[in-house]
Image (cartoon, rainbow, N blue to C red):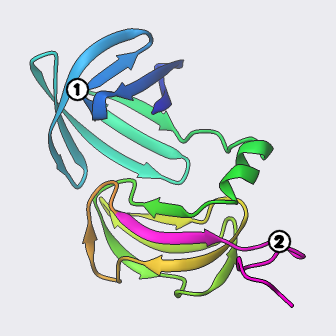
Amino acid sequence: MKQRFLSAGAIHEIELADEGRTATIDGLAAEVELLAERPGELVLRVEGRIVAFDFASDESGGWLCREGRVFRFDRPKPPSRRRREVAEKRDEIQRSPMPALVVSVEVVEGQEIEGGKTLLVIEAMKMETRVSAPPGSWRVAKIFVAEGRQVSRDEELIELAPRPKAGELSGGGDDR
């Protein structure tokens, strides 16, 4: 996974590999271990040294703060039209971007929605974040969480299934 971030006016790129155990920042690789992840706090071991960060995020990205320095992370750019078309043909699992509390669920199973629709709202560090549907036409296949539930980072929240376009068959059977 590659991510861009802005720090002191310069754009940097970080790539995680080996299930997050190796981070490459601007071409320099480092051994990384996640030690603790609590609401608003992230503790890592980087090349044997323990490093703690405060963090927050919203729809556009997030911030890591350490020793008076703020690092801004931008969300990846939307996929190209071709990648969007491929994504529309497969199921999509929406995951929590951070440990948070589910404040509200804005959809129901079976509901047909369009990209950009708010699926649910989560809260971390007194900041609300809207989790929205990716571009395309979707049906809410499964909701894994309920209002008031605490979720962890990367936890499955909602599964979306692509909605067939006009003229496409929704099933695999014979339509006579």
Point out the stretch of residues depicted in magenta. Answer: 156-176
Location of mark 2 (residue): 165
| Residue 167 lies in the magenta stretch | yes
Packing grade of label 2 (10 A; few <14, some 14-19, many >=20) is few
Packing grade of label 1 (10 A; few <14, some 14-19, many >=20) is few
Q: Overall secondary structure of the magenta stretch?
A: loop
What percent of the width, then of the height, locates residue 67?
Answer: 22, 26
Pick whichever, 111 or 165, lies toward us: 165
Pick whichever, 136 or 153, lies toward us: 136
| Element at label 1 | loop
Left or right: residue 128 versus residue 33 is right
Residue at 48% over, 21% down:
13
Tag 2: amino acid: Lys
Vertical relation: 164 (above or below) 40? below
Vertical relation: 134 (above or below) 40? below
Residue at 35% over, 83% down:
147
User: Residue 48 appears in which quarter of the rendering?
Assistant: top left
Q: Quadrant of the N terminus?
A: top left
What percent of the width, then of the height, locates residue 45?
Answer: 14, 26
Pick whichever, 113 or 128, lies toward us: 113
| Residue 130 lies in the magenta stretch | no
| Element at label 2 | loop
* Earlier residue among tags 1 and 2: 1
Give me the C-alpha separation between circle 1 and circle 2: 51 Å
Location of mark 1 (residue): 67
Tag 1: amino acid: Glu
User: Residue 80 appears in which quarter of the rendering?
Assistant: top right
Pick whichever, 151 or 159, lies toward us: 159
